[in-house]
Amino acid sequence: MTTTIIAIGNSRGIRIPKPALIESDLGEQVELLVKKGEIKIVPARVKSTSKGATLLLSEKTLATDWDRPEEDKAWENLQ
């Protein structure tokens, strides 16, 4: 597919035909990978969040954080 680089304000760009966008299945956010003579458009990487992430805690941290009298009292109310 051939297209023309056009002026868009102070920048330059291309129009991507709708069928090409549909076939590529790109979302709203994309990343441009640039090297001499080539610009590649790929989906933007999703930044990881702490939601659902697995956290590793040392035994020392667990012993300090979990072995507290107020924790025992809270558990007694649940049993």
Image (tube, rainbow, N blue to C red):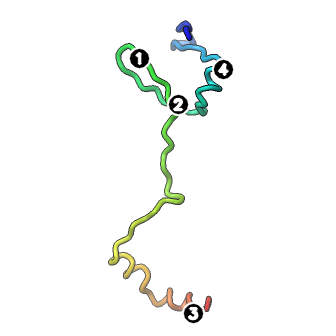
Of the two numbered discs 3 and 4 in the rendering, the one whose residue sits closer to the viewer? 4
Q: Nearer the viewer, residue 68 or 25?
A: 25
Amino acid marked by disc 3: Glu
Crowding near the residue tagged with mark 3, few <14, some 14–19, many ≥20 C-alpha atoms within 10 Å: few
Whole-number angstrom distance, CA of label 3 to CA of label 4: 62 Å
Which image quarter holds the N terminus? top right
Amino acid marked by disc 4: Pro
Of the two numbered discs 4 and 1 in the rendering, the one whose residue sits closer to the viewer? 4
Amino acid marked by disc 2: Val
Q: Which residue is mark 1?
A: 38
Instruction: Give the label on residue 61, or none.
Output: none
SS state under label 4: helix
Whole-number angstrom distance, CA of label 3 to CA of label 2: 52 Å
Earlier in the chain: of badge 4 and badge 1, it is 4
Amino acid marked by disc 1: Glu
In percent of width and height, residue 5 lies at: 53, 8
Q: Which residue is mark 3?
A: 76
Q: Which residue is mark 2?
A: 30
11 left or right of 36 in image: right
Crowding near the residue tagged with mark 2, few <14, some 14–19, many ≥20 C-alpha atoms within 10 Å: few
Earlier in the chain: of badge 3 and badge 2, it is 2
